[in-house]
């Protein structure tokens, strides 16, 4: 008992003498030591100068290979080094925090502070979002091989809450307390279109279709198939506008399109996406027959072989588009099929019983081509008839396109869809203008 008391007193005296020695050393100009018994992150640094403590901590502590297991949803995991996130221990700042008034030095155990590189962490989170994010999926209609329309259910999604992760880590100070496992926070995102919404309109039936024909087994046929594939399954809610260029995208070689015949003025040349205009034309007539409103449509500069005058719809990406608005009052879904030299566009929706829609065109004016007189190199004052040895030029046409609503065999309404102008043919030099297919 007495011996134990003597040992306690000796220990206290030792601490007092050690403290006095530390105070004496600390009072010497340019000589600073850390209070005896001080630890940083569990590592003893007492009696050391700050520079020695810095060197010692960097040597003893191991953080280069410290991982964190990031847990996402649905069992997704990613194991990553903290330093790859921009999170590292800040030994220099930790040691600097030990240079405090003497009365604070009696604290024995100091946490190892950490540094967060916000720019590096944000860049990693942006990249991680591509792995962990799940886009919500809208419910959609799908048309089966038997033309029966059913609904594919919707699915919720989630996005990584990058700001929350950034906030939580940048607010932290202590490296010792960062976790080895971290459950990532997510923001739930709901789809815009739910299954119940679409099911309420079932059944949807065929309300319009249109077919055009082409020569199969060539590059033009390949382009027709590619563009039609992008249209297949497109759903349009009431009031929604379909943009052909938006749905099909640029017609480039990188996207799989090939060079085929396109119109450039009165010339026919090869360019990427030749044949796509036949797809937009077939779609245009089908949607007109379904009762859609024409928002934007352009005819070719000369007649095309696959539809009557006035029923064509030319497109050039970023220049000429086909836009049609669903005015039927019900959702519609498009089915586009190609094969054996035929493209068919079908529109499924709802229509009034006994009602059908017909689309037709008529030539309201024909303008004969003018032929240069003898000796003329360009068009000007000339003849309406081809001279001997001259190529017969195509006449020009003004065409009116009408839509007729027929119920129980009687026409109940006629409306004008558009007027198309096809100028008469004239000799021209090849142009560098973008072509239409």
Image (tube, rainbow, N blue to C red):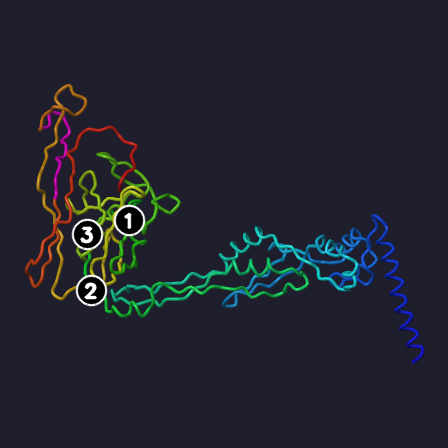
Tell me if residue 436 comes above or below residue 73 in the rendering: above
- Closer to the camera: disc 1 or disc 3? 3
Q: CA distance from mark 1 to mark 3?
A: 16 Å
- Closer to the camera: disc 2 or disc 1? 2
Q: Earlier in the sequence, mark 1 or mark 3?
A: 1
**Residue position marked by numbered label 1 in the rendering:** 224
User: Which range of residues does the magenta coloring cover?
Assistant: 385-399
Quadrant the N terminus occupies: bottom right
Disc 3 is placed on an element classified as: helix
Q: Earlier in the sequence, mark 3 or mark 2?
A: 3
**Residue position marked by numbered label 3 in the rendering:** 285
Q: Left or right? Give the position of 100 relative to 400.
A: right
> Label 3: how many residues lie within 10 Å, few (<14), some (14-19) or many (20+)?
many
Disc 1 is placed on an element classified as: helix
Q: Residue at x 32, y 53 (%)?
A: 230
Q: Residue at x 72, y 58 (%)?
A: 62
Quadrant the C terminus occupies: top left
> Label 2: how many residues lie within 10 Å, few (<14), some (14-19) or many (20+)?
some
Indicate the position of residue 391 as horizontal and vertical percent values.
Answer: 15, 29
Badges 2 and 1: C-beta atoms under 8 Å apart?
A: no
Q: Left or right? Give the position of 363 relative to 250.
A: left
Q: CA distance from mark 3 to mark 2?
A: 18 Å
Q: CA distance from mark 2 to mark 1?
A: 28 Å
Tell me if residue 88 comes above or below residue 177 in the rendering: above
**Residue position marked by numbered label 2 in the rendering:** 350
Indicate the position of residue 85 as horizontal and vertical percent values.
Answer: 60, 55
> Label 1: how many residues lie within 10 Å, few (<14), some (14-19) or many (20+)?
many
Query: Is most of the magenta stretch helix, strand or loop?
Result: loop
Indicate the position of residue 293 as horizontal and vertical percent values.
Answer: 20, 53
Q: Left or right? Give the position of 264 relative to 413.
A: right
Q: Say which of 246 and 101 sits in front.
A: 101
């Amino acid at each position: 008992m007495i011996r134990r008391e003597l040992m306690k007193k000796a220990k206290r005296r030792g601490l007092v003498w050690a403290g006095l020695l530390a105070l004496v050393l600390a009072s010497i100009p340019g000589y600073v030591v850390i209070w005896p018994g001080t630890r940083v992150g569990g590592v003893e640094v007492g009696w050391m100068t700050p520079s020695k403590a810095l060197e010692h901590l960097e040597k003893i502590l191991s953080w280069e290979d410290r991982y964190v297991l990031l847990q996402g949803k649905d069992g997704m995991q990613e194991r990553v080094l903290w330093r790859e996130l921009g999170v590292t221990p800040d030994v220099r700042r930790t040691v600097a925090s030990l240079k405090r008034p003497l009365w604070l030095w009696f604290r024995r155990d100091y946490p190892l502070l950490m540094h967060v590189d916000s720019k590096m962490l944000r860049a990693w989170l942006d990249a991680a979002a591509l792995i962990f994010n799940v886009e919500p999926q809208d419910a959609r209609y799908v048309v089966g091989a038997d033309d029966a329309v059913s609904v594919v259910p919707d699915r919720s999604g989630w996005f990584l809450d990058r700001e929350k992760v950034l906030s939580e880590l940048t607010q932290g100070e202590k490296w010792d307390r960062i976790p080895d496992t971290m459950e990532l926070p997510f923001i739930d995102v709901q789809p815009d279109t739910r299954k119940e919404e679409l099911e309420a309109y079932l059944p949807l039936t065929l309300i319009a279709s249109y077919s055009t024909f082409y020569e199969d087994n060539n590059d033009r046929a390949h382009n027709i198939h590619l563009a039609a594939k992008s249209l297949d399954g497109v759903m349009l809610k009431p009031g929604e506008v379909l943009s052909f260029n938006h749905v099909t995208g640029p017609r480039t070689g990188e996207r799989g399109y090939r060079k085929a015949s396109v119109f450039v003025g009165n010339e026919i040349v090869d360019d990427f996406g030749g044949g796509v205009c036949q797809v937009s034309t077939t779609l245009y007539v089908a949607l007109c027959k379904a009762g859609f409103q024409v928002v934007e449509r352009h005819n070719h500069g000369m007649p095309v072989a696959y539809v009557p005058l006035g029923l064509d719809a030319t497109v050039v990406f970023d220049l000429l588009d086909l836009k049609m608005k669903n005015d039927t009052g019900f959702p519609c879904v498009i089915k586009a099929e190609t094969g054996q030299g035929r493209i068919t566009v079908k529109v499924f929706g709802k229509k009034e019983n006994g009602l059908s829609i017909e689309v037709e065109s008529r030539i309201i004016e024909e303008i004969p081509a003018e032929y240069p007189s003898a000796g003329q190199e360009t068009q000007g004052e000339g003849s309406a008839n081809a001279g001997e040895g001259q190529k017969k030029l195509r006449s020009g046409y003004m065409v009116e396109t009408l839509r007729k609503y027929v119920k129980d065999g009687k026409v109940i309404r006629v409306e004008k869809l558009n007027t198309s102008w096809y100028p008469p043919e004239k000799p021209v030099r090849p142009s560098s203008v973008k072509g239409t297919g």
